[in-house]
Image (cartoon, rainbow, N blue to C red):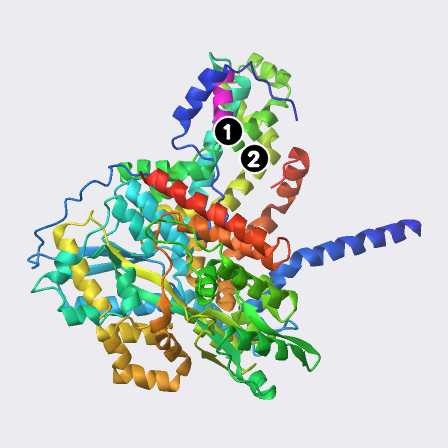
Amino acid sequence: MQSMRMTKPFLATMLVFTLLLMTLSACGQNNPPTGSSSSSDQTKTTTETPAAEKPENESIVTTLDNPVEITFWHAMTGHHEETLQKIADDFMKQNDKIKVTLVSQGSYGDLQQKLTAAAKSKTLPTMSQAYEDWITEDIQNNLVVDLNPYLENPTIGWRQDELNDIVEVFRNANNWDGHYYGMPFNKSTRILFYNTDYLKEKNIDVPKTWDELREAAEKLTFEKGGKKVIGMGFENSVGTEFSMWVRQAGGKFIDEETGSVEFNSSEGQKALTFLRDMIEQGIARLAGEDGYMSNPFGRGDVAMYIGSSAGIPFVAQAAEGNIHWSGAVLPKDKVAATPFAGTSVTVYQSATPEQRLAAWEFIKFLINTDNTALWAKETGYLPVRYSALQSETWKKYVEENPVYGIGEQQFDAGFFDPRILGINAVQTALGKEIEAALLGEKSVDQALEDAAKAAQEAIDRAKERAR
Amino acid sequence: MRDALSKGTIYLLLSLGGILMLLPFAWMISTSLKPANQVMVMPPVWIPHPIQWSNYAEAMRVAPLGRYFINSVIVTVLSTAGELITTILAAYAFSRLQFYGRDILFSILLGTMMVPGEVLLIPNFVTLTKLGWIDRYEALIVPWLASVFAIFLLRQHFLSIPKELSYAAKVDGCSDGRFLWEIMVPLAKPAIVTIVLLKAIGSWNAFLWPLIVTNSKEMRTLPVGLTAFRTDVGTIYELLMAASTLVILPMIILFLILERYIVEGVSRAGIKG
């Protein structure tokens, strides 16, 4: 190849022109099709208008005279998407003035990127699935609708008991200083999966505490027909569920109010040491190359694991014809602490008053007693209403499928991760440092210290940017 | 005898390499025909029993792959053709025409390669929104009608073609346009094929951009369709592999047809994909 012939570039001019040319130029079309970049420190929208006093919708529309169309962005796929579509179809049958268009936007990470782009270009949908920490940011940027005027309205709102019917931990997760900016939709929790064959064979009761868990893992690490069985398994994302372990040990994670990182404590050390020791002893492993623990668990390589209740269908599929299994509430240490995660539904201020009303009506329908029970049955997520948990259909369903009843047994121990800006970056840092400790690359103290430092920096940076 | 031996060794090594390369594809096809509980077993099952053809039907049912396929073809063909035209013209201008500021312009063009695509994502999205192109073919195609890298690649190729050819053509009264299309382009065929392939593969596999600029199922492309088989707690591998097989098949056929040019292009240009 002949060498490039370039006259001496006038650097300054060139840079200016380069900046000008950065419009529609075609670099980097081949973005890797991973899509799940949700954990990385995503490009945050900087505040365009300072989040001053919100000109909140004091007067709202409560009746629809003309047909209205609303768009709902979500990250549901496969059967989940079909179920959501069915609920939307039922809704439209009952409300012939409202047309709901569901748009699947890939994974949660993809959805978040799309929402960021849409917020920038003022093309947000009427409503979307969103994690609560996204909503926190949207509140600061004045993008989301305060739902209080709707739910307090005597004609279209909820009575106090209807609101209180929503499971407390989910209700609180959507409440910012007394204002609801979202309603819980697809919520999941962590449960302990175990192989009933192995537990029976070794005559072990389902572990209820950390000590019992370690003991069980020790006994359940054995040779079975030439195959090595490992007692306990953790998802690769064990680092992002560290808040659960710290809380169980009696410690604190991150203060939502002040944004101060508090997991670098004796409880944090205890939690991380507990996890690391089990892995070091060879009685526990990470999912590693298997991607998700449901795979090694399903083929009988691992006797127990802690994972998302949303993964139950995957466990069932992987286990079919291979093993017998069941689930239980999480073991506890000093305290019982169970994370509840998953997204809520939020409405954007770009919607017209009529669209906001239609969106509110759809939210009410989406999580009414029957539909939240139907949704839970079809997808493995949790019903978000106490009345749904009490319904005959749900009770009968849980009787037939006991693992789906575990989530509700641990509502009292439930917590949700702090809904603060920068939490994604915190999770990334935690994931990295915890993994380093579990793989023996760093000492427990060092990993915790580094994680706490990185987490605090991420939070402070996000705060600074939002200002 | 010794020749035969060394030939044998070469074939053996090449066969081993070939098998290594084919393994993932074999695995993909095998997985696409498995019942769910055989996907992740140890030791791996290579030949599924029973062979579950219904995975393909199920994959097609879960995602409208037919529609996605048509969109992928439209987007790939048009953006590749468009890029080819802009590239040939630009490369010719930058290598053969004399005009004021040519080399500075070219430096600036190269400068844009230093801007990572992710940075441009949101500004580009905003621009397209203002043009009203979101959820339309324009958004999927127009931003990709020019590639700086392709222009650079072809320009270098054009520079390696002796100037005497163009002098001779000029003397014979050949216009710039005719000289470009009838002499330069055929001579640069390996480079052009390389550009076409890189572009076609990139466009066929593009994920983030099509996802960002489309909203309706009717406008989405195959890679976006593949997300239907992934969730945050697990992947439905057998369906994903069935769909992936369908996605990759056209690329393999294209490769088989153009194989000769690809090998030629790559070995001459020394460009790694």
Kindly identify the residue that appears in the image at 53 percent across and 53 percent down. A448
Q: Is residue A44 visible?
A: no
Residue extending farthest to the right is B1
Residue B105 in the magenta stretch? The answer is: yes
Q: Residue B57, which numbered label?
A: none
Mark 2 neighbour class, 10 Å CA radius: few under 14, some 14 to 19, many 20 or more: many
Mark 1 neighbour class, 10 Å CA radius: few under 14, some 14 to 19, many 20 or more: many
- Say if B72 sits above or below A22 in the image: below
Which secondary structure, mark 2? helix
**Looking at the picture, how far across and down is residue B271, in whole percent?**
63, 36
**Looking at the picture, how far across and down is residue A130, in whole percent?**
32, 56
- Say if A435 sits above or below A27 in the image: below
Using residue A207 as the reference point, say whether residue A350 is left or right of it. Answer: left
In the rendered structure, which disc, 2 or 1, sits on the residue that comes first in sequence?
1
**Looking at the picture, how far across and down is residue A168, in whole percent?**
27, 68
Using residue B196 as the reference point, say whether residue B71 is left or right of it. Answer: left
Kindly identify the residue that appears in the image at 48 percent across and 51 percent down. A428
Identity, as a three-letter code, of the amino acid under mark 2: Ile
Q: Which residue is mark 2?
A: B192
Q: Is residue B68 visible?
A: yes
Chain letter for mark 2: B
Identity, as a three-letter code, of the amino acid under mark 1: Ile
Q: Main secondary structure of the magenta part?
A: helix
Q: CA distance from mark 2 to mark 1?
A: 9 Å
Q: Residue A320 or A207: which is nearer the viewer?
A: A207
Question: Which range of residues does the magenta coloring cover?
Answer: B103-112
Q: Which residue is mark 1?
A: B88
Q: Residue A37 or A131: which is nearer the viewer?
A: A131
**Looking at the picture, how far across and down is residue A331, in whole percent?**
47, 74
Which secondary structure, mark 1? helix
Chain letter for mark 1: B
Marks 2 and 1 belong to one chain: yes
